[in-house]
Amino acid sequence: MNIFSNLLSQTTQSATAKKQRRGIEIKSLREIEIMRQSATIVATVLKEISELVKPGMTTADLDTYAEKRIREMGATPSFKGYHGFPGSICSSINNEAVHGIPSHKKVIRVGDVLKVDTGAYYQGFHGDSCISIAVGEVTEEAAKLIRIAEEALYKGIEQVKAGVYLLDLAGAIEDHVKANGFSIVEEFTGHGVGRNLHEEPSVFNYRTREMPNVKLRAGMTLAIEPILNAGSRHTRTLSDRWTAVTVDNSLSAQFEHTVLVTETGYEILTDRSKV
């Protein structure tokens, strides 16, 4: 979930948002172990959704399934009720870049690019991850967009280890995206994650001087999440005050992992290949 960039830009914040901005937290070994469990719940739910989604289902069907599974595994949905968000997942289709609200009216169709983002809160800590799913046969452009979005995420993750800087991640993501002819949404960023769903630092997906270039330390936990558009990088938010769509109606894709910074590299806590 990418709402943190909006929270940072607000001049007036709620008490909850203020509480969340506690500085960059370094997790203890005990806290990291709990986060492994919350992240595993998220990874499990997303893997299961990727296997069950089919044309004719609605995004509300997926939301119901995700909430049921999260609760069955002893956690609560991180997104539901967060700043008023009504769902347990964000479900964004085609030109919807992020924060799509699940609905019985949103029917999934062959050829769709479906983004499913979810989080789980377990024993005081959150996990957060997103996948993009090609529903049946998609266009060559859509398939490439999904592939490059996932590759861009891993290009950023591969830079992670104690002592490197956030803009090293951002640069690796930006270079891969631009080399393949796509654009990066700049209105939304990755973020720290742990006791709060959104913590500092902001994790940019492009080079910028707008925020401090933080040096990574072992024990940081980051949600890295590039959003790519096939056309313009710009988005606009619909009247529901959540769903962000591309201004030119172009396709959008997103991938996200919760990642632990270690002394020698990284650990992908939401790794779906391990569940």
Image (cartoon, helix red, strand yellow):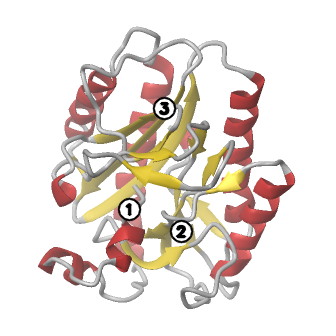
Earlier along the polypeptide chain: callout 1 or callout 3? 1
Give residue 142's position: percent from left, percent from top: 68, 29
Task: Choose mark 1 or mark 3, whichever is in front.
Answer: 3
**Residue shown at 55%/47% (left/top)?**
271
115 sits left or right of 76 in the view: right
On-image quarter of the N terminus = bottom left
Tell me the SS state at disc 2.
strand
27 sits left or right of 138 in the view: left
Tell me the SS state at disc 1.
helix
Earlier along the polypeptide chain: callout 1 or callout 2? 1
The circle drawn on residue 35 is 1
Type of the residue with mark 3: Lys
Type of the residue with mark 2: Leu
Please give the residue where the numbered disc 3 appears in the rendered image.
47
Where is 215 relative to 169, above or below? below
Give residue 208's position: percent from left, percent from top: 65, 81
Write down the quadrant of residue 64 in the picture. top left
Please give the residue where the numbered disc 2 appears in the rendered image.
260
Disc 1 to disc 2: CB gap under 8 Å = yes
Type of the residue with mark 1: Met
Say if residue 5 shows up in the picture: yes
Q: CA distance from mark 1 to mark 2?
A: 9 Å
Q: CA distance from mark 1 to mark 3?
A: 18 Å
**Residue shown at 48%/71% (left/top)?**
221
Packing grade of label 2 (10 A; few <14, some 14-19, many >=20) is: many
**Residue shown at 45%/42% (left/top)?**
43
Earlier along the polypeptide chain: callout 2 or callout 3? 3
